Image: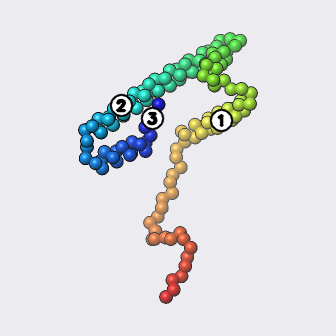
Amino acid sequence: MAIIMRSEFDDIRAHITAEPPRPSELLELAHSLLDDLEQLRTREAILRSHYLALLTAARATVAADAAGHPAALTFLQHELAEHGQLPDGEQAQRILSDAVAAQAMLAHLDEPAAPRRSRAARGAVCGGVSRSLRG
């Protein structure tokens, strides 16, 4: 599946504005863009279905735990195994560390941004090595 990157869109835009339009080339470009859009819509639908399955499994796991089910993790384990995402022993510590770091970052997203230091208007400043002019 070929997905058009931002730089490719920029290249296409530059090409379109640089040359007089030729109907055949524009039609070819339009078909290509529509194909990419359709592929993206299909991929989004697939990702949404995977997300929904994972969310359903997570909710079932929490509900089973709340109801005192002896194997509450079964739902989530099954869904993760379905996609080859069930962690093995050596991955567990890294995954836990990543989860803690992600939670810490998410907690800071709600904090107001630090005020920016204003730059006072200054004269021309040279950051290079100072040299004296020969005169």
> How would you rate the neighbour count of disc 2 (Cα within 10 Å): few for under 14, some for 14-19, many for 20 or more?
few
Q: What residue type is disc 2 on?
A: Leu
Colouring scheme applied when the structure was drawn = rainbow
Q: CA distance from mark 2 to mark 3?
A: 11 Å
Residue 50 shows in this picture = yes
- Which mark sits nearer the N-terminus, 1 or 2? 2
Q: Position of residue 11 (x, y in %)?
A: 38, 46
- Residue 63 as seen in the image, left or right of residue 3: right
- Which mark sits nearer the N-terminus, 2 or 3? 3
Query: Measuring 33% from the left and 37% from the top, which residue is drawn there?
Result: 29
In-front residue for pair 6/115: 6
Residue at mark 3: 3
Q: In the figure, residue 13 lies in which quadrant? A: top left
User: From the viewer's perspective, is residue 59 above or below residue 32?
Assistant: above
Q: What residue type is disc 1 on?
A: Asp
Query: Measuring 46% from the left and 71% from the top, which residue is drawn there?
Result: 124
Residue 62 shows in this picture = no
Q: Position of residue 86 (x, y in %)?
A: 66, 23
Q: Position of residue 3 (x, y in %)?
A: 45, 35
Query: Measuring 51% from the left and 83% from the top, which residue is drawn there?
Result: 133
- Which mark sits nearer the N-terminus, 1 or 3? 3
Residue at mark 2: 34
Residue at mark 1: 98
In what element is the residue under mark 2?
Answer: helix
Q: CA distance from mark 1 to mark 3?
A: 29 Å
Looking at the image, is mark 1 or mark 2 nearer the viewer? 2
Q: CA distance from mark 1 to mark 2?
A: 38 Å
Q: What residue type is disc 3 on?
A: Ile
